[in-house]
Protein backbone atom coordinates (compact mmCIF):
# COMPACT_ATOMS: atom_id res chain seq x y z
CA UNK A 1 0.00 0.00 0.00
CA UNK A 2 1.38 3.40 -0.93
CA UNK A 3 1.88 6.09 1.68
CA UNK A 4 -1.02 8.09 0.21
CA UNK A 5 -3.36 5.08 0.23
CA UNK A 6 -2.33 4.34 3.79
CA UNK A 7 -3.13 7.91 4.88
CA UNK A 8 -6.49 7.83 3.09
CA UNK A 9 -7.34 4.54 4.82
CA UNK A 10 -6.36 6.09 8.15
CA UNK A 11 -8.57 9.15 7.51
CA UNK A 12 -11.50 6.95 6.52
CA UNK A 13 -11.08 4.97 9.73
CA UNK A 14 -11.12 8.18 11.77
CA UNK A 15 -14.31 9.49 10.17
CA UNK A 16 -15.80 5.98 10.05
CA UNK A 17 -16.39 6.13 6.30
CA UNK A 18 -15.79 3.46 3.68
CA UNK A 19 -14.52 3.92 0.13
CA UNK A 20 -17.92 3.71 -1.56
CA UNK A 21 -17.55 4.20 -5.34
CA UNK A 22 -21.22 5.20 -5.61
CA UNK A 23 -20.45 8.34 -3.55
CA UNK A 24 -18.85 9.90 -6.65
CA UNK A 25 -21.82 8.91 -8.83
CA UNK A 26 -24.17 10.61 -6.35
CA UNK A 27 -21.98 13.71 -6.08
CA UNK A 28 -21.85 14.18 -9.87
CA UNK A 29 -25.56 13.44 -10.41
CA UNK A 30 -27.96 16.28 -11.14
CA UNK A 31 -30.93 16.88 -8.87
CA UNK A 32 -33.19 15.19 -11.43
CA UNK A 33 -30.88 12.17 -11.64
CA UNK A 34 -30.79 11.89 -7.86
CA UNK A 35 -34.59 12.07 -7.70
CA UNK A 36 -34.78 9.32 -10.34
CA UNK A 37 -32.43 7.09 -8.32
CA UNK A 38 -34.46 7.73 -5.18
CA UNK A 39 -37.70 6.94 -7.01
CA UNK A 40 -36.26 3.68 -8.35
CA UNK A 41 -35.22 2.83 -4.77
CA UNK A 42 -38.71 3.75 -3.50
CA UNK A 43 -37.33 6.50 -1.28
CA UNK A 44 -38.65 10.09 -0.92
CA UNK A 45 -37.39 12.64 -3.46
CA UNK A 46 -36.77 15.24 -0.74
CA UNK A 47 -33.56 13.32 0.06
CA UNK A 48 -32.01 14.43 -3.27
CA UNK A 49 -30.14 17.49 -1.92
CA UNK A 50 -28.39 15.45 0.78
CA UNK A 51 -24.79 14.32 0.57
CA UNK A 52 -24.28 10.57 0.07
CA UNK A 53 -23.02 10.16 3.65
CA UNK A 54 -26.09 11.96 5.00
CA UNK A 55 -28.37 9.25 3.59
CA UNK A 56 -29.03 6.31 5.86
CA UNK A 57 -27.10 3.10 5.20
CA UNK A 58 -30.42 1.44 4.32
CA UNK A 59 -31.23 4.13 1.74
CA UNK A 60 -27.75 3.95 0.20
CA UNK A 61 -28.02 0.17 -0.05
CA UNK A 62 -31.50 0.40 -1.61
CA UNK A 63 -30.31 2.90 -4.23
CA UNK A 64 -27.35 0.72 -5.21
CA UNK A 65 -29.40 -2.49 -5.22
CA UNK A 66 -32.30 -1.07 -7.26
CA UNK A 67 -29.94 0.69 -9.72
CA UNK A 68 -28.14 -2.62 -10.27
CA UNK A 69 -31.50 -4.39 -10.74
CA UNK A 70 -32.58 -1.77 -13.29
CA UNK A 71 -29.28 -2.04 -15.15
CA UNK A 72 -29.60 -5.82 -15.31
CA UNK A 73 -33.18 -5.58 -16.56
CA UNK A 74 -32.29 -2.97 -19.19
CA UNK A 75 -29.37 -5.07 -20.45
CA UNK A 76 -31.72 -8.03 -20.91
CA UNK A 77 -34.65 -6.03 -22.29
CA UNK A 78 -32.60 -4.00 -24.75
CA UNK A 79 -30.81 -6.79 -26.57
CA UNK A 80 -30.55 -6.23 -30.33
CA UNK A 81 -33.15 -8.94 -30.86
CA UNK A 82 -35.62 -7.36 -28.45
CA UNK A 83 -35.15 -3.87 -29.88
CA UNK A 84 -35.73 -5.03 -33.45
CA UNK A 85 -39.01 -6.78 -32.72
Image (tube, grey):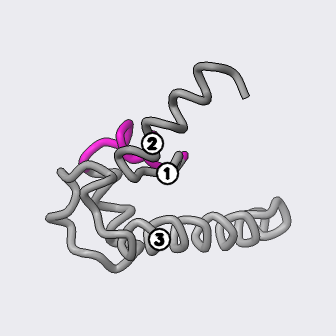
What separation in Å lies between label 1 and label 2 (alpha carbons)? 6 Å
What separation in Å lies between label 2 and label 3 (alpha carbons)? 19 Å
Question: Of 34 and 59, which appears nearest the observer?
Answer: 59
Question: Residue 11, percent across and down?
Answer: 43, 36
Nearest to the eye among marks 3 and 1: give it.
1
Compared across the picture, whether 29 is left or right of 80 comes to left
Q: Quick one: quadrant of the N terminus?
A: top right
Q: Give the residue number, with chain letter if any, for mark 3.
A: 61
Question: Residue 70, percent across and down?
Answer: 58, 70
Compared across the picture, whether 19 is left or right of 14 comes to right
The extreme top residue here reads 3
Image height of 84 relative to 51, above or below: below
What separation in Å lies between label 3 and label 1 (alpha carbons)? 13 Å
**Label 3: how many residues lie within 10 Å, few (<14), some (14-19) or many (20+)?**
few
Dot 3: element: helix
Q: What numbered label is drawn on residue 12?
A: 2
Question: Residue 64, percent across and down?
Answer: 51, 65
Q: What numbered label is drawn on residue 57?
A: none
Amino acid sequence: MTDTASRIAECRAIIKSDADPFRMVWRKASDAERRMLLTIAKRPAWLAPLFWDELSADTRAAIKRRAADLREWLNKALTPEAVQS
